[in-house]
Amino acid sequence: MKHQPHVFHDDYDTLILEGEELEQSSEDDLWFLPGPMEEEPDYLPPGPRAEPCDAEVLEDWRKAEAGHAARLARVAGRLCALDDRLKRGPEGWRHRLALIEAADLSWFAGDSIGPDRLALWISMRLSGVQDDTAALARVGWAVRRLTGGPGPEQDLSALHDRRDPENLGVETEPFVVRASGWLDLMGHADDLHPITRAAMGFHLWGLAGLGQHGDRMEAAVTAARIAASEGRGTVFAPLAMGGAGGLRAGGPPDARLARWLEGMETACLTAMRQLDDIEAWSARAVAEMASLSGRTPPALCAVLTEWPFVSAPMAEALTDASRAAVQRNLAWLEALGLIREVTGQRRFRMWRAAN
């Protein structure tokens, strides 16, 4: 019997070919489906970086301090000289510098309050029609805190008048809670120089969520108090006299500390020049007033030493003298060239010491 050749191999191959053709035909019919997944292109911007931990922040500021050790020593010497000068001088010098510093800080914070308007507000609560009373109140707070009160590392809530009300909302985080992280970090930075610690605290103030409408003013006043925490004559370290470039943010701690030291050195030198000028003026005024009798002339001299700008109503209130006595002595001082009228007006006039 003759065997028939097996043909199932050919049939199997035919089935495979027909299946592949059917599969290809099916794929062609599904043209509307999306194609195969491709790798996502790497041109998207990176996401936000994680905030550095406290240990990394402290280490960065320690490295910055080490890198600027020579400049830091020089600025600390400037501040020490200012402290000694204020310790030996009259109390009015501190108030004068605080008022000038607060007015300069107001321009940095965006309030733009001049020392003449600030003097009227603090002494008599007077403001012009176009004055922002809220801004005046903020800068007035700065003057008070630059001349006294608890230090920021002693009682931060009292320094900033930020006592939480009893009916605080559930969703509102108490100030003491928000301040605790900032205070803990400042406490761990006690190995840093107060000037460096002040710079670090200033730049971390907003990140800690401590700022409100006047946050930059609050941060600067807090830092000024920290920088002078070891002083005996000065309550604050000047930061903005002569320009507030040292308070500008941006860059790593090394760059920020470099700007801080440069700005603070300029501010300390400006403050010393202010004291030189008013001390020389006071000596000249005392010599000229030696022949005068009464208590109004020396009292008026003390007011002009303490306040950069003085009006007649201010002088009357601060010296407790009569309006006639104040006006007579102001006219006499102006005739001698000891004071100069600065407004050029017939009313609402103000005078300053003529150096």
Image: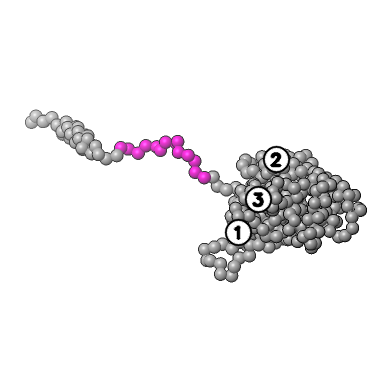
Q: Residues within 10 Å of mark 2 (few under 14, many from 20)?
A: some
Check disc 2 and give the amino acid type: Ala
Find the residue positioned furthest to the bottom: 166
Tell me, for residue 113, which label it has, or none. Answer: 3
Q: Residue at x 19, y 33 (%)?
A: 21
**Does residue 167 appear to the left or right of 127 in the view shown?**
left
Q: Which residue is mark 2?
A: 258
Q: Which residues are magenta?
A: 35-48
Q: Which residue is mark 1?
A: 178
Check disc 3 and give the amino acid type: Ile
Sequence-wise first label, 2 or 3: 3
Sequence-wise first label, 1 or 2: 1
Sequence-wise first label, 1 or 3: 3
Q: Nearer the viewer, mark 1 or mark 3?
A: 3
Q: Secondary structure at mark 1?
A: helix
Q: Residue at x 69, y 41 (%)?
A: 259
Is 118 placed above or below 173 here?
above
The span from disc 1 to disc 2 (Cα, nearest Å) is: 28 Å
- Residue 45 part of the magenta segment: yes
Residue 289, x across and y down, in percent: 88, 52
Residue 122, x across and y down, in percent: 70, 58
Query: Dominant secondary structure of the magenta stretch?
Result: loop
Q: Residue at x 64, y 48 (%)?
A: 112
Residue 242, x across and y down, in percent: 72, 42
